[in-house]
């Protein structure tokens, strides 16, 4: 079964990783960022070695995002980020091929062990099974 495993975050988290503290998140040091990337690299290597990794990517700062919606007149409306009204954003994801929900949950638990500075917020890791049922 395929699963989408998503790591949540916030715009403040991205700023903190760039060294700018906020009430929501302390500033990350260069060592903090290196520890996070090292952890993620090790995790990705393990998932590739086990054959469970289909894809995985970290996403850029939500300030670089663009929303496209339909306006009241039915025409597309394009808005560039950041979006103050959005508290949580998708920070990164994996598409994994795992034998069971229990196995992908073990992986998600490991993701929550990613090092971060004292006082940094704990965001959820969300698991969603990918629906392989489509048109016949």
Image (spheres, rainbow, N blue to C red):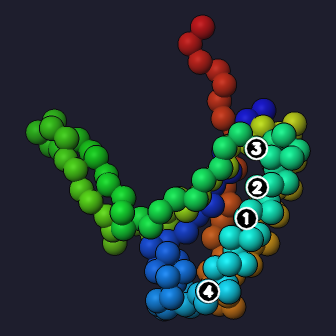
Q: Could you tell which of marks 1 and 3 lies nearer the N-terminus?
A: 1
Q: What residue sits right under mark 2 in the picture?
A: 44
Expressed as whole percent of the image width and height from the top left, the position of residue 77 reads: 19, 47
Residue tagged by mark 4? 30
Label 1 Cα neighbours within 10 Å, binned few <14 / some 14-19 / many ≥20: some
Look at the numbered disc 1 and give the secondary structure of its residue. helix
Q: Are marks 2 and 4 in contact (CB under 8 Å)?
A: no
Q: CB atoms at circles 1 and 2 under 8 Å apart?
A: yes
Report helix, strand or loop for mark 4. helix
Q: Nearer the viewer, residue 37 or 102?
A: 37
As measured in the structure, the alpha-carbon distance from the residue carrying label 1 to the one carrying label 2 is 6 Å
When asked about the image quadrant of residue 25, the answer is: bottom right
Q: Residue at x 64, y 21 (%)?
A: 133
Looking at the image, do the residues carrying marks 3 and 4 touch, with CB atoms under 8 Å apart?
no
Q: Is residue 108 above or below residue 52?
A: below
Q: Which residue is mark 3?
A: 53
Q: Earlier in the sequence, mark 1 or mark 4?
A: 4
Q: Residue furthest top?
A: 136
Question: At 76% from the left edge and 55% from the top edge, which residue is drawn?
Answer: 44
Q: State the residue position of label 1.
A: 40
Specify whether residue 129 is in view: yes
Q: Position of residue 98 (x, y in %)?
A: 83, 39
What is the quadrant of the C terminus in the image?
top right
**Mark 3 in CB contact with mark 2 (< 8 angstroms):** yes
């Amino acid at each position: 079964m395929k699963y989408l495993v998503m790591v949540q975050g916030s715009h403040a988290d991205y700023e903190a990783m760039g060294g700018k503290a906020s009430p929501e998140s302390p500033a990350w040091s260069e060592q903090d960022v290196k520890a996070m990337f090292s952890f993620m690299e090790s995790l990705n290597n393990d998932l590739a070695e086990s054959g469970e990794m289909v894809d995985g990517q970290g996403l850029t700062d939500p300030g670089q995002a663009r929303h496209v919606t339909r306006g009241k007149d039915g025409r597309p409306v394009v808005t560039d980020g950041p979006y103050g009204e959005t508290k949580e954003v998708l920070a990164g994801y994996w598409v994994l091929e795992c034998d069971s929900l229990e196995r992908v949950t073990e992986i998600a638990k490991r993701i929550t062990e990613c090092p971060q500075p004292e006082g940094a917020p704990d965001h959820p890791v969300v698991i969603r099974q990918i629906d392989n049922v489509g048109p016949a």
